[in-house]
Amino acid sequence: MDTAFPFGFPLPTAFYITTYVLTLAIHVVFMNYVLAGTGWLAIAYLRKSPRGPESSAGILKDWLPVMLSGAITAGVAPLLFLQILYKQEYYTANLLLFNRWMAILPVLIVGFYALYLLKSRWLAQQPYVVAIVIACIPWTAVAFTGYSWTENHLLSVRSPQFWGEFYATSSQVYYEPQLLPRLAMWAIGSVPTMVIFLAWQHWYRGTGRPRELALIAGAGLFLVGATAAWYYLVTDDATCLAFVSPLARPYFVLAILGVIVQALGWGWLYVSEQFSVRKLLVPTLGLALTLIGMTVCREAVRITTLGEDRFEKMYPTHAEAFGKGGFFVFLAFFVINAGLCSFVFWLVRHRSIPTQIEQNPPTPQEPTQRNQN
Ligand code: HEM
């Protein structure tokens, strides 16, 4: 693999792996919002921070149910391509983890309903400790799901001989040293992503303080660097070299550039103390670069771990699937579903903004920031 992603692959593989990376990046955006957002909400309840409609916790409470649906729905498209690209690997890991793996379904359902309970009037009549317990459930459910995906992924890239030995242990829990730092990178990396979207939501409502969000995003970016160092220390050299291999190098540079652009954007927001479209676009652009860059690097790490020979042996399966057609059907359903999802988001926005305006009507002397920009 001495050509940059995806140019060195045959057409069917290049097509599936590119579509996989792009759709996975969309999943990551939603997933990051719910992972960090549910954590933020749990902390807000524990600290008894303000949770009114203008506060960050209030916005999260309002939006998290639909964003969780978004994360789950957006996971389906990469799942389809994953099954074509790495069929044996993915299903073997699923079967080996068995009930442990399937547990993500009931767990996510519980987390989902807990988010709705947080919005209910019923909760306001309960002792505060009940609210705290319920506020911690969504994060636990979402974090457990993230942990399961990482565990499943790491097991899927092991050798068939390893799978045999793992099966013989009858264990349904898989652990290896890079699991925790990898998970930590996902968890902490979710914070700057979520904060950018939260900032856009504050801008839209004309609420929030850029300084607070800039500090949290900055801390998130710094800590991602620390977890990356941890990952580097516990991971073998071949895996680390995948990041700078010809396959991934341009994307690794892109990802780092994205982090720098995000940091500069947040610095600008921190000093200017006001949200505006121009200022918010800078960290958003940086985030897009980092997400695409890191998703490609993640794929380069997988191919390196599997080994080039093993990956190349999958090419005929990709070509066979490619020959079956169905692309336009996929595209049609993608467009229809994207339209339906956008409609659902529009409905949520439509219903959430008036609530805030009804409770805090802007006075003529106090135009919202959105109107100013
Ligand atoms: C909302 C809770 C979820 C969270 C927190 C979450 C988190 C994650 C994480 C952390 C990864 C990366 C694992 C790694 O590289 O170590 C991942 C990958 C992935 N997720 Fe999700 N996920 C969630 C729900 C879902 C659902 C419901 C689906 C499917 C419908 C899905 C589809 C995928 C796919 C296809 C991948 C790529 C797996 C691979 O390449 O091996 N996710 N998810």
Image (tube, grey):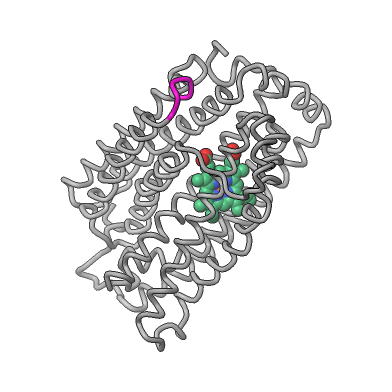
Return the residue nearer the eye: 93 or 225: 93
| Residue 192 is one of the magenta-drawn residues | no
Percent of width and height locating residue 350: 48, 67
In the visual, does 246 lie left or right of 321? Answer: left
Percent of width and height locating residue 111: 53, 66
Total labels drawn = 0
Q: Identify the residue at the far bottom of this view.
A: 125
In the visual, does 202 lie left or right of 107? Answer: left
Percent of width and height locating residue 198: 36, 55
Quadrant of the rendered structure where residue 204 is?
Answer: bottom left
Q: Identify the residue at the far top of this view.
A: 2
Q: Can residue 162 be seen in this view?
A: yes
Q: Identify the residue at the far front of this view.
A: 169
Q: Identify the residue at the far left of this view.
A: 271
Q: Which residue is drawn at 30% across and 41% down?
A: 221
Return the residue nearer the eye: 233 or 250: 233
Quadrant of the rendered structure where residue 164 is?
Answer: top right
Q: What stretch is highlighted in magenta?
A: 235-239
Q: Quadrant of the N terminus?
A: top right
| Residue 236 is one of the magenta-drawn residues | yes
Q: Residue at x 51, y 49 (%)?
A: 147
The rendered magenta stretch, by its main secondary structure, is classed as helix
Return the residue nearer the eye: 325 or 350: 325
Percent of width and height locating residue 231: 39, 34
Q: Residue at x 47, y 55 (%)?
A: 143
